[in-house]
Image: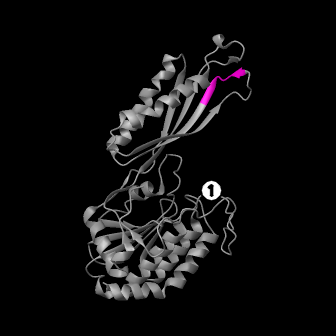
Amino acid sequence: MPTATTAIEHARQLQQEIVELRRHIHKYPELSFSENETAALAAAKLRELGFAVKEHIAVTGVTADLGSGSNIIAIRADMDGLPIDEANDVPYRSSNKGAMHACGHDAHVSCALAAAKILAADRNSWSSSGTVRMLMQPAEEHSDGEGKSGAMRMIEEGVLNGVAAIIGQHVDSSLPSGKVGILAGPIMAAADSFSITIKGKGGHGAYPESAIDAIVIASQFVQAAQQIVSRRISALEPAVLTIGSFHSSSTRGNVIAEEVHLEGTIRSFSEQIRKQLMSEIERTLEIVKVLGGDYSIAYEMGYPATVNDTNLADLMRQTAVDLIGKENVVEVKPK
């Protein structure tokens, strides 16, 4: 394998290439499960390096293996952009209307391909004892019609079969350039969303006694839901419940709403708390029925919490120290 000195020297030699590749990908972002050009670019570069490439995994995903050893280490990068119009005034500004690399996946792909190039250059020292598997993942930002993301679809198609460990990174604008943040254990929370419809009985604002005001009922639920984390979850367990959208069926001040639609999100670091948050939301919704209304709720389950393996995190930390110095390796807080 490359030594710390040769690896960092090689990376520095590739810096301009990485920057140019990142800016090219940034200029042509593609949305979830539509990363056709990005995937084709990654596949072509990996094929040039001698990797055995498979395309169209989970629609637009790419896998690529190099090496003949049974010990498989995977390197993962996500490829999709976000449905945002870019306002930045830069030469490499997005040219695809309604799409932008606002979450750093352009950098993730570029860095992963650079890592592949560095490893390929030194393949004679390691390829007989191990295998590197590149995972270029579609749809990190969005799920398909069945509620499954690109990661879930790729796993279903067997890309992790035989994989001993998987390594990924995420750019973080809160860290100064040149710093690397590493943390063992939970580092990124599970992110799930919910959609609630609260139903009452519409009526005239002058005669509230003949109606069941969905706004009043929904407001009672929102207030009660804010006590779930503070009063139903242990203070030692991180959890967030946010209701970010509240819309009623009435658009007039003198019309009592028949229906209110709410959208929210829950964040958690353990599967137990994840399930408890959902259970507590549904328990709190019983207040709707007590007040004469009814409700329906639907969840869109996102990724589970990202939990870094302790031994691998320690190895990565020491590797980072060897590469860029102890002063540039920091322990980040969970997000």
Residue at 32% in and 80% down:
322
**Residue type beneath disc 1:** Pro
The segment highlighted magenta reads 255-260
Q: Is residue 278 visible?
A: no
Q: Residue at x 54, y 84 (%)?
A: 16
**237, above or below 169, in the image:** above
| Disc 1 target residue | 83
Residue 257 picture location, percent across and down: 66, 23
Q: Residues within 10 Å of mark 1 (few under 14, many from 20)?
A: some
Residue 234 in view in this figure: yes
Q: Is residue 212 left or right of residue 229?
A: right
On screen, residue 207 above or below 249? above
Q: How is the image coloured?
A: one colour
From the viewer's perspective, tell me whether residue 42 is left or right of residue 252. left
Q: Nearer the viewer, residue 96 or 335?
A: 335
Q: Residue 324 at x, y = what percent? A: 38, 80
Q: Nearer the viewer, residue 120 or 273?
A: 273
Outermost residue to the front: 327
